[in-house]
Amino acid sequence: MKWSWWIGRILGIDIYMHSTFLILLAWVAVSYYLPGHSVVAALTGVLFILCLFGIVILHEMGHALVARRFGIRTKDITLLPIGGVARLERMPEDPKQELMVALAGPAVNIVLAGLLFAVLMPMLGAAVLMTWNDSLLTFGAFLGQMLWVNVALALFNLLPAFPMDGGRVLRAVLAMRMNYTQATRVAASIGQGMAVVFGLIGLFFNPFLILIALFVWVGAGQEATFVQMHAVLSGVPIRQVMVTDFRTLSPQDTLIRAVGHTLAGFQQDFPVLQDGRLVGMLTQMDLLLTLTQRGAQVPVGEVMQRRFETADPSEMLERAAARLESGAGRTLPVLQGRQLVGLVTADNLHEFLLIQYALEEANQRPVAA
């Protein structure tokens, strides 16, 4: 996620903090400081938030570790002012597995609450006998706050507001009775309905709920779109969609030739061939950067990317889309053996999706009598 800083790694999973998290810490520090102008109070508030987000990390680690059990890697965990986000490589295709992954986070909070309760019980008894021990009472109050934080996090995350944990639980249960895409649409609609409720409550009681409402509304819409896109691309081989009318370059060509191809058509990235063999890719970004720094007479061979990913014509579009989304580049050259037979681009996939959505819309219209 952009504007995020790496803060550590736990069990092989990178933890990032988004820059907006600093705004939350500053706001908490100021709000605790102003009533009594106490630096200690401000530090106490910041410490409480840091402990809260330590619990959030454990919550997200619960999701990540159960997902790992099913062979799904977690790319990273990012801390935001509204909570944490664990980026899984993919969601489980089995609804039962998704149910377990979704419940793992709240389960961590329930276990932590139980452990804190077990620690607090004898401490409360001791506090009654030692009322003069302020440090014991203060420590007990802090643990009590952490107990209720875990209870609140577990209950709040189990609300059926997709894409929160409760919404994913709902989607998994629905997917056991209907197809995955339809289950996602229903869960997303309920999630956006919950977002409206959060927003209305936030207007009158707690503005922080408005941020959560925005997150739920946007997240539910994006997840529904992604699942629909996945369903459209699933089972379609690249050969049916790849671009077959494209331009190539050789390492000896100068960049002026690439400029001419760019202006003459819509192609942005160019395969570089040497004796009919693919040896590199000239990306639009590298082209523009070199034109700015060195001019148009630079040979393509000095600028092209020599390390790049390729695709096979029989590979499914959903895998190609995932690779493009993960940063493998904006263009995947398609090789049949060693021969370049086509290109798959993000624009290419977008056009295919638009056509499929239009056809689906036409098929759903009632036929006039």
Image: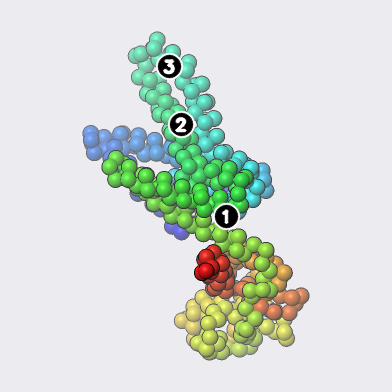
Residue that appears at 24% across and 38% down: 34
Q: Nearer the viewer, residue 269 or 203?
A: 203
Q: Work out whether residue 54 can be spotted.
A: no
Tag nearer the camera, 1 or 2: 1
The image quadrant of residue 126 is top left
Which amino acid type is shown beneath numbered disc 1?
Thr
User: What residue would you read off at disc 3?
Assistant: 124
Which amino acid type is shown beneath numbered disc 2?
Val
Could you tell me residue 308's position as x and y percent?
Answer: 64, 71
Q: Nearer the viewer, residue 162 or 41?
A: 162
Dot 3 and dot 2 residues touching (CB under 8 Å)? no
User: What residue would you read off at disc 2?
Assistant: 151
**Farthest residue toward the front?**
369
Helix, strand or loop under label 3: helix
User: What residue would you read off at disc 1?
Assistant: 181
Q: Distance from label 3 to label 2 (Cα)? A: 19 Å
Helix, strand or loop under label 1: helix
Q: Distance from label 3 to label 1 (Cα)? A: 51 Å
Dot 3 and dot 1 residues touching (CB under 8 Å)? no
